Amino acid sequence: MDKKILNILKKLEKYGYKAYIVGGFVRDYILGIESNDIDICTNALPKDVINILKLDKTTKDNYGSVNIRTKKYNIDITTFRKESEYINHRPKSISYIKDIKEDLKRRDFTINTLLMNSNEEILDYYNALEDINNKKIKCIINTHDKLSEDPLRILRALRLSIIYDFKIDDEILDFIKNNKSIIKEISYFRRKEELDKILISKNRIKGLNLLKKLNLLKVLEINFNNVKDTNDIIGIYSQINFCEKYPFTKNEQDLIKKIKEVIKQGSITIETLYKYGLYINLVAGNILDIDNITINKMYNALPIKSRKDIKINTQSIVKLNNNCYNNINEIYELIEDNILKGILNNKNKDIIKFLRK
Ligand code: CTP
C-alpha cells in the first residue's frame, strides 16, 4: 500500500481522529486489483481535514467531502455520516456522526464495507471477507430499501457481479425481477458509466447475456442480437443499438457510424480502407472475422491513403477544369476511384493526361 496514502490516515490520527480507507479501493485491494480511486472516511469534520492536511478550502465539495487529486490518485475524504430518508434517490439531508459502523450501514453492498487502517490492517464489520470468498454480491441490510432508495445500485450490483464473476444474492435478483421499471429513473450518463465498466471487462459477453436474460434491455433502452467479442469498446458499441439519449461523444458517434457501415457491407475492401482508414477497418474486420494481418497488408498496399497523396493539387485540377471550382469534388472522386482500382498511375503527368481526356 502506498505510504503517501497511509500517511494521510496517520496525520488525521495524530490529531486524535479516526481515519480509514473504505469502499471499492479496499474491495479491489483484497481482490488483487489496482485502483487509483481512494475513499477515506474519518470522524474529522471537513474543515479539520483541510486544516490538518493543509489543503485549500476549495477542495471541499457541496456534499462535505474533501477531494485531493495527485498525479496518481483521486482521493475523497468524507466525514462519517448518516443519511436521512431518500427523496428522488438522494438523501434529503446528512448528519455527521461518530460511529464508523453506522456510516458503513448507509452504503450498498457488504463487499464495499471493508476498511483499511493506517497499519494496513483490514477491518471487517459486515462479513465482507466471507462474501468476497463466497463470491457474493449482497446488500448490507434490507435489500428492498437499499435498491429502491437508489436504483443505480441495481446496475452497480450487476456490474460488480459481471466484472468479478460473482453471484448476485437471490434477494437482489428477486427485487430486479419485480421492480425493473425503476431502472428507467437512472440517468443515461450513469447507465452508460456502468455499461462501460461492463463492456471493458473480459466478461462483457456474459454480462450482456445476463442483462438479456434478466429482461433488462427494454428498460435500459438498448438492444442487440449476437455481439461478437472484441476488446475495443467502440467495436462493442457498434454492435449494440443504444437509445439516442445515451451520451456518446461526437467522436464516438462518428466512429460507431463508420464501423456499422463497414459491418453492413460485410467485407473489407480497398474502398472501405481508403474511405475510413485503418482503425475502423481493423475493428470492423475483427467483428467480421477477417484477420488483422490481411487488413494491414491490404492497407499498406493502397496506392494512396488520402487525397493528400494524390500527385496533383487542386489548383492544377481547377485549371484543367476551365478555371471552374464547381465539380472539383467529383473530379477528385473520379481520380481516387481510378487510382485505387489500379487503372490510373498516381503520377502527375498520367493524372493530367487522364483529366484532359
Ligand atoms: N455507494 C452506494 N450507492 C451508490 C454508489 C455508491 O451506496 N449508488 C457506496 C458504495 O458502498 C461505495 C461507496 O459508496 O463503495 C463509494 O462510492 P464509489 O466511489 O462510487 O464506488 P466504489 O465502490 O468506491 O467504486 P466502484 O465504482 O468501483 O464500485
Image: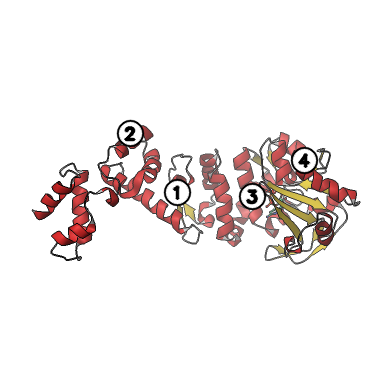
Residue at 43%, 46% in the rendered image? 225
Task: Tell me which label, 3 or 1, sits earlier in the chain.
Answer: 3
Q: CA distance from mark 1 to mark 2?
A: 28 Å
- C-alpha separation, residue under disc 3 versus residue under disc 2: 40 Å
Q: To which residue does mark 4 refer?
A: 3
Q: Quadrant of the N terminus?
A: top right
Relative to 4, is 225 on the left or the right?
left
Task: Look at the numbered disc 3 and say if its residue's Cβ is closer than 8 Å to ligand 1.
Answer: yes
Which residue is the site of mark 3? 156
Q: Secondary structure at mark 3?
A: helix
Residue 224's disc number: 1
Foreground label between 3 and 2: 2
> Residue drawn at (14%, 59%), measured in percent from left and top?
320
Q: Residues within 10 Å of mark 1 (few under 14, many from 20)?
A: some
Classify 10 Å Cα crowding around label 4: few (below 14), some (14-19), many (20 and above). Answer: few
Q: Does residue 218 appear in this view?
A: yes
Closer to the N terminus: mark 4 or mark 1? 4
